[in-house]
Image (cartoon, grey):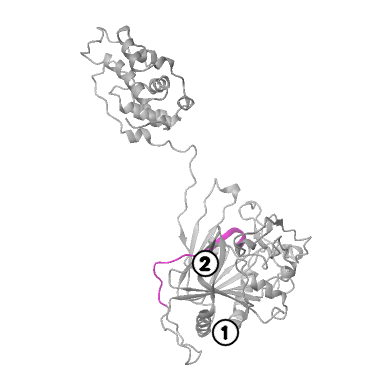
Amino acid sequence: MEETDGLDTETLLAILASLLDPPWPEQDVLLDALTRANGKVEVAAKALQLKQSDRVPGSASRTTKKRVATGVLDDWLTPSSAESSNLHKKSKLTTALTPPTMATKLTKSAQVAFRNATPGPSKHPESSKQLIPLTDVLRPPPPASPTVPQLAPLTLSNPAMVEKHTPCTLHLGVLPPELACRLFHRMVNASKEWTTNKWWLFDRVVESPHKTSFYARQVDGVSDDESWQEAAQYWYNGRVTSPPSVFPPEMEEACQLIQKVVNEALESRSRYPLEWGGTGGTRGQSWKANVAASNCYTGGKEGVGFHSDQLTYLGPFPTIASLSLGTTRIFRLREVIPRSEVENRRAQTFNIPVVHNSLVIMHASTQERYKHSIPPQRAVDVFRPGFPSHLGPNVVEDENSTCRINITFRFYRPDFRPPSIPRCKCNVPCVLRADMKGRDKDDLKGERMRYFWMCYAGAQNDGKGCSFVKVMDAESEGRGPFIGDRDSSVLAT
């Protein structure tokens, strides 16, 4: 027989039952037999088989009158004088110690299943009984409490569905078609000089499959303030990059139109207390992009995993406008469930097809509650620009493209300028992260949302960083003004 050491009680009982002929003893009898046999299935089976043979019709040792089945262990295991010597030679059962593992009781559901599979002694041994498959006996019991059902992914194919299910809004045909094509041609040509991002993760260097670049707008003193160069250099995974490029003319023209769309959308939305509350706008803020992160995804294999955008220079509850140009890809959103709710609900995945010349505005709370990604696809549609390239005869471009250009326009807040960012023990600017899993489900306004300054040197310093962690204290750090300080009538309720 195969080695049975280390098996759990339910499995040992099932094996023991399979070695016996029907009718089977009660489960308690089997358990006590295993206990007396010190967990040895073969020894327990032989002892029970001796008593079974006493009950088989025609057996030499069978008494004239049938013994009434009692289901008591002694009725099965107490040998007659004729059997005691043989049983003693086979196994010293009476001196066996009870192992701790065999004293473990079965679960209630396992007991019920096993009783169905192992009936006790019958007054009519010759009667046939339906055998229960061993797999039914070994099937694990159901969980104590029902699990929370997994929600199926949901495709949000129009602006109304996006606004209903997420804190984002979708805007189609946001730019004039000719401008959208000019900007697409400009960025595809520029992406030839872009680079992939590399950083350390789990003691090895990883590389993003797509190419990225960073642009700074020539307004609001961004290009004149050298401190913003630092912000650009540390914008992605802590990697020190070259100084940012200035918005090309097509990007500047597009940005002015996108600002109007964003500010119109903000007019109809409730706000969060920690949003930027600077001067301008009819409700405490006029959103004005001053930087842009650009990404190029070529073909269906290039993408980016789930992440939330860094808040280091954006501050709490930022608004980010994400423009898509070129071939259609899926923009995927998934909520991060707080620890206090993981036993009650599951996160649902939302897939938003982002077509050419569409804008997804990630409104306040998106970065605090959700993570987003661009998943790889087996195939992508070929994009054919509706307008030819304007870059001159020396620039050769393929009329059929599988590229998606993504430009995320961002507002770097004046109260989070680089000189105000804490540095860790590695003398590297910290990264600001929201406590996504620790947020309070009842805190609808985000007033109790916590943010942490953390060391981020490990992303580039051979995976080595320090243990620096500090809770952001907006008041002592001189952050603001916030919308909550200006006008409570526009706050979320």
Q: CA distance from mark 2 to mark 1?
A: 30 Å
- Name the amino acid type tagged 2: Glu
Q: Earlier in the sequence, mark 2 or mark 1?
A: 2
Q: Which secondary structure lies at badge 1?
A: helix
Q: Which label sits on residue 207?
A: 2
**Relative to the observer, which residue lies in front, 108 or 202?**
202
Q: Position of residue 260 (x, y in %)?
A: 62, 77
Q: Residue furthest left?
A: 58
One can see residue 81 in this view: yes
The residue segment tinted magenta is 367-382
Q: Is residue 460 left or right of residue 116?
A: right
Left or right position of 54 against 317: left
Mark 2 vs mark 1, foreground winner is: 2
Q: Amino acid at mark 1?
A: Glu
Q: Is residue 129 above or below residue 153?
A: above
Q: Position of residue 169 (x, y in %)?
A: 56, 68
Q: Which mark is residue 458?
A: none
Local SS, label 2: strand
Image location of residue 64, percent across then percent down? 24, 7
Q: Are marks 2 and 1 in contact (CB under 8 Å)?
A: no
Disc 1 packing (10 Å; few <14; some 14–19; many ≥20): some
Q: Quadrant of the N terminus?
A: top left
Number of marks in the image? Answer: 2
- Residue 49 percent coordinates (x, y): 30, 19
Classed neighbour count for the residue bearing mark 2: other residues with Cα under 10 Å, few (<14), some (14–19), many (≥20)? few
In magenta segment, residue 482: no
Compared to 182, does 50 lie above or below?
above
Q: Residue shown at 66%/75% (left/top)?
A: 288
Which of the labelled discs sits on residue 250, or is there none? 1
Above or below, 368 relative to 288 = above
